[in-house]
Image: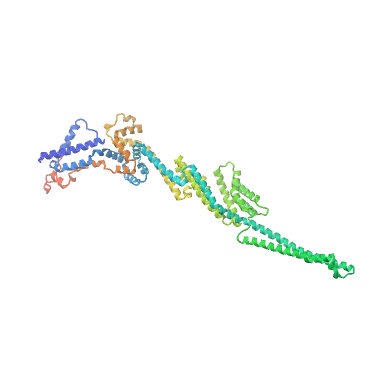
């Protein structure tokens, strides 16, 4: 083919390629349509520009066809347009956004949620506008994620409803009592064996006294026998009868009974009573040898008074009043033998201090009363607990420890139940609870001094709560970014449209961002908005859209042809007049310019 054919092929092919790219730019809203003389001049200019490559048409033509064919698939115009809008919305945060989207894939979250930790208001506003076009998706996402969160919290609380949680708590309390009650009963029964020690020791004392009395009775009988014998002899002497007949006299018979039958019975009784006293004393000693002793009330009262008389508590009417109340109850339940029942002391331990606080501070709220009582009980409990253990109630402290630990677990379950309630009714309060901003609420449930949720809850309980709180915070961050990104989003959409496409009345509604965005969305195009809607639902879709071929790649072929330095050897040889088999080293590269292209 001659030069004319070369120019016609290369120039016309080049012109067609550039005109095709021009159409793509217009279709994508990147350029306005040509007006006036430009409608004729520009196509001619493109053909002439192609003609400047002279014989290079044989090489440039195929290159142009390949680049144009690669980049001008009009079916991808909405996708490319959508990708450009997304990339513009992200701006300098591109690496962080892409990494966050990839990390969020397969995690059951939306694209907005995957990137919520990155401060990108325009991007979040774009996602919000795009996905709002598919309310069914948003509703389904909210429902599925809500169910996941409720299931996680319900598992911690022991039920999905308040009634379920309460039933679980009540069942747990019954289980605690079932487990710990035998421990309590064993310890208290053992402590109450001290009452038997007291009874045996009292019995031994009484029998000893009775045995001693019988010994004295024997002695008196012997003395009476001597007196009776002397009296019998004296009577016989007075009657001039032999004294040997005294045993036949009344006095003699009394003497015989005193020396024999009566003294023997008294002596035998003394032996029996003595033996009984020794048995009772040995039995009491055996019990004492294994740590059983009477639980006496008087020493307890003295110990409590010693606490109340501590100068450190001078003027503390609550403490002294509560100690007096406890002391009075101990005295009331102490028997005449000076021993108090261990069960009565256990009940006093539970009830007396609280009753005293209610009497001394009747207007105080329940939580404050409980905290005040805890402070007093810390002084009272050790005295009572030591007394029960010392009386033989081994295991009483262990019972208290086990009961306290298991009750604490129940309290933690109640706290997670409260967290579930707040999650349903007030998510901000839920977040404050989990973030340790509601110590009063925590202390009210877990007990006095237990207000730090991070310290009191086990890791496997706290972690799910923190995860759900993080989701609430994440969604709040998205909402805030969406609100702050509205104006920037409007400007972004304006920049991605040809100015000639803008309606004349847009400036009149520009102050109303939402209304302006509605108009801009319509002008952007349904296909582009549909592409955005579908892609920005999930991290996977958003990442794929972002990583699609950038719009800047459209001009790579033209830039390559416009810069001979970047041409390959065959192309440069064809254009500069050399052959593909060799290069004329005496002829430097020629950069042919067309005046029409300047």
Residue 30 appears anywhere in the view: no
Specify how the rendered protein is coloured.
rainbow
Q: How many numbered marks are there?
A: 0
**Residue 494, above or below 97:** above
Identify which residue, 323 or 65, lies in the foreground: 65
Residue at 12% in and 42% down: 55
Instruction: Residue at the far left: name it.
Output: 2
Residue 302 percent location from the top left of the image: 64, 53
When asked about the image quadrant of residue 565, the answer is top left
**Residue 431, above or below 225:** above
When asked about the image quadrant of residue 259, the answer is bottom right
Left or right for 80, reference 373: left
Residue 307 percent location from the top left of the image: 61, 52
Identify which residue, 471 or 232, lies in the foreground: 232
Residue 577 percent location from the top left of the image: 11, 44
Quadrant location of the N terminus in the rendered image: top left
Quadrant location of the C terminus in the rendered image: top left
Residue 479 percent location from the top left of the image: 39, 39
Left or right for 350, reference 272: left
Residue 533 appears anywhere in the view: yes
When asked about the image quadrant of residue 471, the answer is top left
Left or right for 418, reference 189: left
């Amino acid at each position: 083919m001659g030069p004319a054919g070369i120019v016609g092929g290369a120039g016309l092919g080049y012109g067609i390629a550039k005109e095709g790219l021009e159409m793509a730019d217009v279709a994508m809203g990147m350029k306005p349509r040509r007006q006036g003389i430009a409608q004729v001049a520009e196509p001619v200019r493109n053909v002439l520009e192609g003609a400047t490559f002279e014989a290079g048409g044989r090489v440039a033509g195929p290159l142009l066809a390949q680049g144009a064919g690669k980049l001008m698939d009009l079916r991808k115009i909405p996708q490319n347009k959508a990708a450009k809008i997304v990339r513009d919305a992200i701006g300098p945060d591109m690496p962080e956004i892409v990494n966050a989207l990839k990390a969020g894939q397969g995690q059951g979250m939306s694209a907005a949620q995957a990137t919520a930790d990155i401060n990108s208001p325009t991007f979040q506003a774009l996602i919000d506008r795009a996905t709002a076009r598919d309310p069914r998706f948003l509703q389904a996402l909210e429902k599925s994620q809500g169910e996941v969160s409720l299931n996680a919290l319900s598992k911690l609380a022991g039920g999905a409803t308040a009634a379920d949680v309460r039933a679980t708590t009540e069942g747990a309390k019954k289980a605690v009592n079932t487990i710990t009650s035998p421990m309590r009963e064993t310890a208290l029964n053992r402590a109450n064996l001290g009452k038997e020690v007291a009874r045996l020791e009292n019995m031994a004392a009484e029998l000893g006294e009775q045995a001693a009395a019988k010994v004295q009775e024997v002695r008196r009988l012997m003395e009476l026998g001597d007196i009776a014998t002397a009296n019998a002899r004296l009577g016989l002497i007075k009657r001039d009868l032999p004294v040997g007949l005294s045993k036949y006299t009344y006095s003699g018979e009394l003497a015989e009974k005193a020396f024999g039958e009566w003294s023997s019975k008294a002596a035998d009784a003394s032996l029996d009573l003595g033996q009984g006293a020794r048995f009772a004393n040995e039995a009491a000693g055996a019990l004492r040898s294994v740590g059983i002793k009477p639980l006496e009330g008087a020493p307890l009262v003295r110990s409590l008074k010693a606490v109340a008389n501590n100068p450190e508590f001078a003027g503390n009417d609550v403490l002294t009043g509560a100690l007096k109340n406890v002391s009075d109850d101990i005295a009331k339940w102490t028997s005449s033998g000076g021993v108090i029942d261990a069960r009565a002391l256990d009940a006093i331990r539970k009830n007396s201090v609280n009753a005293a606080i209610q009497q001394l501070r009747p207007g105080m709220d329940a939580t404050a009363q409980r905290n005040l009582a805890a402070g007093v009980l810390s002084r009272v409990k050790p005295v009572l607990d030591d007394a029960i253990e010392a009386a033989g109630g081994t295991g009483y402290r262990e019972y208290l420890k086990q009961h306290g630990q298991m009750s604490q677990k129940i309290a933690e379950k109640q706290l997670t139940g409260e967290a579930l309630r707040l999650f349903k009714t007030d998510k901000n309060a839920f977040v404050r609870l989990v973030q340790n901003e509601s110590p009063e609420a925590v202390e009210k449930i877990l007990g006095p001094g237990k207000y730090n949720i991070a310290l009191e809850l086990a890791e496997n309980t706290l972690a799910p709560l923190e995860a759900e709180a993080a989701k609430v915070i994440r969604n709040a961050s998205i909402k805030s970014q969406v609100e702050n990104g509205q104006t920037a989003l409007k400007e972004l959409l304006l920049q991605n449209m040809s100015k000639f496409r803008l309606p004349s009345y847009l400036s009149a509604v520009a102050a109303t961002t939402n209304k302006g965005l509605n108009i801009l969305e319509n002008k952007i195009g349904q296909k582009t908005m549909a592409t955005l809607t579908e892609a920005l639902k999930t991290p996977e879709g958003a990442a794929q859209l972002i990583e699609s071929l950038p719009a800047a790649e459209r001009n790579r072929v033209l830039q390559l042809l416009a810069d001979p330095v970047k041409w390959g050897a065959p192309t440069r040889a064809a254009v500069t007049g050399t052959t593909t088999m060799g290069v004329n080293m005496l002829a430097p590269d020629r950069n042919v310019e067309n005046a029409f292209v300047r």
